[in-house]
Image (cartoon, helix red, strand yellow):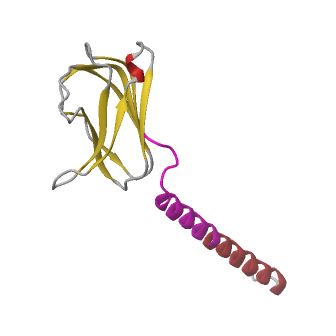
Amino acid sequence: MSQPKGRHMKSKRLAALRDSGRRIGTVALGATAVLGILTPPAQASSWSSSLSGVMPGYESRRWYDSGGTTAIKFTGCSSGTHKGAEVRLRKDTFGPDPAYATALFTQCFASSSSTSTGTWSDKGSGDYYFAVNEAGVNLKLTVRSLTVSY
């Protein structure tokens, strides 16, 4: 049995529309996937810890920063008679590690809930760490809580 000519043409047009819709959907889905891969995550990263009796020259753990501002916050500092700690951001490289500005943390020594924060502008992507009292001020630094945000 054969279909009437009008009905056959409608079937062909519907099939063509369905194929066209599938192609558009596939292209749109592919474009969305590519944009999702190329777009960096919007949220910042951070990690938290504490320090107990660290000596001058102490180096923190390393973290990977894809770029942006870095903030280091100490809460509840103590070190005997000293009431300040020098905190310096450094980039971990194969050669000598570049050192960025040193922040002097003093407010965190006021009480166990007082904080000091150092902020460094974007230094590019790479592995970073902070060093404490590289100048050699002889103290054993304890920090109740520290947070690194990047």
For the residue pair 59 and 65, the one nearer the viewer reads as: 59
Based on the picture, tell me whether residue 47 belongs to the magenta stretch.
Answer: no
* Residues shaded magenta: 24-45
Q: Judge left or right: residue 90 versus residue 40.
A: left
**Residue 142: percent from the left, percent from the top?**
28, 18
Residue at the bottom extreme? 5
Is residue 82 placed above or below 64 in the rendered structure? above
Quarter of the N terminus within the rendering: bottom right
Residue 61 image-quadrant placement: top left
**Residue 64: percent from the left, percent from the top?**
32, 47
Q: Judge left or right: residue 24 versus residue 89.
A: right
Residue 28 image-quadrant placement: bottom right
**Residue 12: percent from the left, percent from the top?**
72, 81
Q: Judge left or right: residue 31 versus residue 10.
A: left
Quarter of the C terminus within the rendering: top left
Seen at 42% across and 22% down, the residue is: 107
